[in-house]
Structures are given as C-alpha cells and as structure tokens.
Image (cartoon, rainbow, N blue to C red):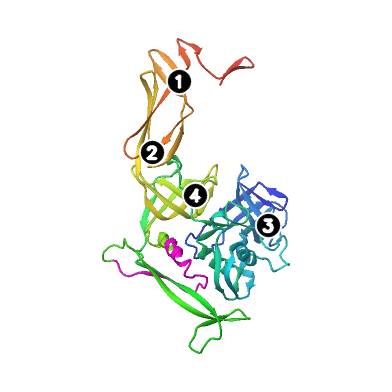
Amino acid sequence: MYIAIGEEEYHVITNLSFAPSADLAGTSIPIDEFQADIHTDDDYSEWSAAALYDDNDNLWAGGYQIIYAEKQDIGIVRIRARSDVALLDRFTLPAVYYNGADIEDVLDETIVNADDTIPGLYAPWPYTLDNSLKNKTITGFCPEQTARDRLLWIVFVIGGYIKTSFNSHIHILPSDTTATMVPKGDTYWKPTVSYKDAVTAIKVKSYSFTRGEPSSTDKWVTDGTYDYIVTEQENTLSNPDTPTGTLVNVKEINGVYLVNSSNVSGILTILAQWYFNRQEVNADIINNAAYAPGDLIQLHVDDETMVSGFIDRETFAFGQQAKATIHLAASEDVETAMLTIFYKYDNIQLDRKEYLMPVGYAYSITNPYIDFAMNGHWYVFYPEAEAATGTITSGTNESTQTYDVALDLYEGILYVISVDSVTDNDGIGVIE
C-alpha cells in the first residue's frame, strides 16, 4: 500500500487503518477516513488532498482531505484523511422549494464549495450519479440546512446511497442487483449469522405544499420569498413475515419534506428490504479491493449453506494480502446445488472436485494440469478446454473435462508429448 499526496508517493507507511462503510437505506451519509504513519520528513498542511492505493495501483480512497498531520518521531508523520463528504458540513444552504426539479441541477446546487479558503477544491465538487438515477426529479421543500443534510435528503428520496471508498469522489448509486460470489477459499472459517429485532411496520410521512397565506392553524414553511402550507400524509407498510408473538416495533421516518405521494411507495419498498430482513452476517474474507461497501455478495457460511447480503461496513487489516472483516445487512439464505467436475483421460478418471454454488450462478473454473502415476509412468495431463463453464441449476450438476498427455516420465526418461513450446535456457530446457 502507498499514499499519494499531491505529486508525491509515499511507499513506506505503517499503522495503516481503513474502515469504509455505506448506509444502503439512505438514512445517513457515513464519513470514511484512513489513518497511517508516513515515514518521511515532509510537512503537510490540513486540507491537502490524499489518496490511498495498493501496490497494484488500485485506488482505495481518493479525493480525501487531510484533517490531521503531526510528527510522531524523527522521520514519521501521522496523518488522518477524510472523504470530502465531511466538508459538506461546513456549508449552510438556504431554504428552497423544488417543483419537479432535475436531479442533476439539484445536486449541482447541493454539492458545492462556498469557501475559497480551502485549497484544491472548486464548485461544484466532482460527483458521479449513476445513469439509472438520472431520470429522477425532486419535488418538495428543503429548510436551511447543511449541504451534507440536504444531500442525505436527496439521496434518500431517489432510492440511492453514497459511496466514497474505492473511487476518487462522491458516487451516488442505487442498490446493487447483481451478486458477486466470494470464493470459498477466500473466506476465513467460520462466518457468524445473527438476527436483529424484528421490525413490524414502517411508517413514513409524505408531504405536499401549497403556496399561499397560512392561517393560524396551518402548518407552514417559507423559503424567504413565499410561504407554503404543509399537508401531511402518513404511509404505513406492515411486515408480512413478522413472527407470531413479536412485540410491536415500528420504524418511523418523519420530517423529510422531499418525500411526496409520487416517491413514498418506492421509499417504503427500499426501507422494507433493510428493516424487514433480520438476518445479518459477520465474516472475514480476503479482499484486495474486490468488494466495497454497498456491494451485494454471496459467500459460504458452512459446508452446506450460502448467504447473500449487502456489505455495509468493513474493517481492513493489511499484510501480503488485505483481509477485511465485513458485515452483511439484509442477508438471506441462497438456494444452492452441488457441482461435480470429473477430469478424465479416455475412460480413466484423473481427479474430481465438488463445489457448492448458488442456483443460477454462471461459473467458469480454470481446469488444472494434473499429475498422475499409472503403470510405472508419471504423467502430466493437460486440459483440452481452458475452463469448465456452465450455469448451476437445481439438483445435480456434473461436468466432464477431457485431458491428453503432455509429459510422460518413464524409467528416468522424460518424453515430451504435447506442450506449447520448449526453449533452451543455458543448456536447461524450459517447457511451457
């Protein structure tokens, strides 16, 4: 791992910590940060831009701002850097009423830099809005509030979440719909499954606004130019799978004035996914920038069970490979089936392997070269196909992979039958 600050790269770092997260229900915007000791005599000022990379130049955290830089010892500086979401708390936006406003116009007004004392920033700050969300509009009222609070309201009502890890700026994304399977060999044994308290119902208030002169009994708001009379509607979605005897536990969301009759149904559906699904999973996996907060993944919890769920937080430990302790929200068991691969030469079975996989999973498993002793010969067999491929269905799944002889060692003599190439390296033959 290394840290880039401005044009400089620092490859000697210690005590690195990084624990990104994401609120997929859209009810908060976590602030990601990383901390490390950099072995250098350089000095840094607060608000310098910092980025975290691995040794393969994969970006782990970009566009972060240094909020702390202090010398710990001779030649060692400790820094803490936070995602630019934290800076949105510095800016207060005026009250505004939107009526079918384009989402990108609203975001451009929200993700702003109104303080030219912070170097290296400009208005609007860079952000990426997923294409699936670009057709959204905003209708409702925003009071005077911080830019971060307003961004939270906007993201909540369009059904998105904020991601600030493994990218260079703010990403606004919908919930993932395609699951990525974590190989069993990359999961440390054994993940733990737990269950949170059952939520029996979700209540969300929606609002409409009428411009006019409010009476003494009216609830009203103002944007400084016009007054708007507020009408409220309570919307409830009950949990159809509440266990018998469960105590009433209602999740209520009120006061978000961008919730209206057009978007409240979608909001309830998204919230139900997070609050009605009680299962959670904690697991340790090898994660070299492959899985980020917000990702939908599938993993093995034991030899017979797999689950799917959304990563909402992970804590990294760094060594030769990165290990992540992850938490999965909205987890559920996955229908699985066994795949058996037979590796054969003529009618001789050289090996077999079994894999537990989700039904519907399109697999591609690289076929290995196989050593096999038979009748005094020591053979190396090569696969006729590079990989076993297919899609897992319910029930029995079998795949037969055929092999031919590549090398034959017999009575001390190596016979080259079929190889890609043989080259001479200072008198030593190299077979590929």
Q: Secondary structure at mark 2?
A: loop
Marks 2 and 4: CB-CB under 8 Å?
no
Q: What is the three-letter code of the residue carrying label 1?
A: Phe
> Residue visible at 56% across and 64% down?
137
Q: CA distance from mark 1 to mark 3?
A: 53 Å
Q: Nearer the viewer, residue 312 or 70?
A: 312
Relative to residue 314, is residue 353 depicted above or below? above
Marks 1 and 2: CB-CB under 8 Å?
no
Relative to residue 392, is residue 68 depicted above or below? below
Relative to residue 422, is residue 162 depicted above or below? below
Q: Earlier in the sequence, mark 4 or mark 1?
A: 4
Q: Please name which of the two marks, 4 or 1, marks the residue nearer to the observer.
A: 1
Can the viewer see residue 18 in this picture?
no
In percent of width and height, residue 413 lies at 49, 10
Can residue 107 be found in the magenta stretch?
no
Q: Which residue is disc 4 drawn over?
A: 324
Q: Which residue is disc 2 drawn over?
A: 392
Relative to residue 311, is residue 341 depicted above or below? above
Q: Which residue is disc 3 drawn over?
A: 49
Q: Which residue is disc 1 drawn over?
A: 381
